[in-house]
Image: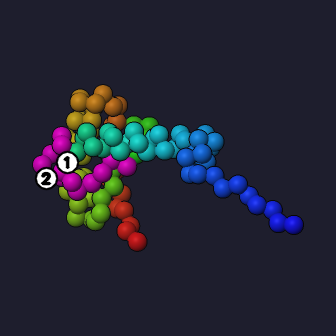
Amino acid sequence: MSRTKKLQSIHERIAQDKGLTALIERADQLNDLNKRLQPRLPAPVKGLCRLANIRSETAVFACDNQAAASKVRMFSRDILQIMQRDYKISVKKLRVVIEQLT
């Protein structure tokens, strides 16, 4: 006698898992904010990084390489001011991480 398991669609699985649902919503919010923020970034850093997270008073930006990260760090004060002024986000620090592409 064989047992068969009912396979769930990914949408059903997500709907049942509250933690996963919250995580996906958070990722969508950050992605949306990143899309709105990119055009407002200082010209030398547009497209070099993406908003990866906001935790407490720290905005985390992810860059592909060290050169881009250095440039973003140079403009960190401007980026923080844009986030505070235009988006009313109370961030006081900017952290830059290098994404490791595999």
At horizontal 30% and vertical 44% (from top left) the residue drawn is: 34
User: Between 90 and 26, which is closer to the camera in this rendering?
Assistant: 26
- Residue 4: image quadrant is bottom right
| Up-down relation of residue 12 to residue 64 (above or below) | above
Kindly state the secondary structure of the residue where label 2 is placed. Answer: helix
- For the point 28% across and 65% down, the residue is 65
Q: Is residue 32 visible?
A: yes
Please name the residue that numbered disc 2 is placed on: 44
Q: Position of residue 74 (x, y in %)?
A: 20, 52
Q: Which residues are magenta?
A: 39-52
Residue 51 on the magenta span? yes
Residue wearing tag 1: 75
Residue that extends furthest to the right in the rendered view of this protein: 1
Image marks 2 and 1: residues in contact by CB distance under 8 Å = yes
Q: Quadrant of residue 58?
A: top left
Q: Residue at x 43, y 45 (%)?
A: 27
Query: Where is residue 23 shown, x and y percent of the image?
Result: 51, 44
**Side (left or right) of 67 relative to 22:** left
**Furthest-front residue in view?**
1
The Cα atoms of the two marked residues, 2 and 1, are separated by 9 Å
Mark 2 or mark 1, whichever is nearer to me: 2
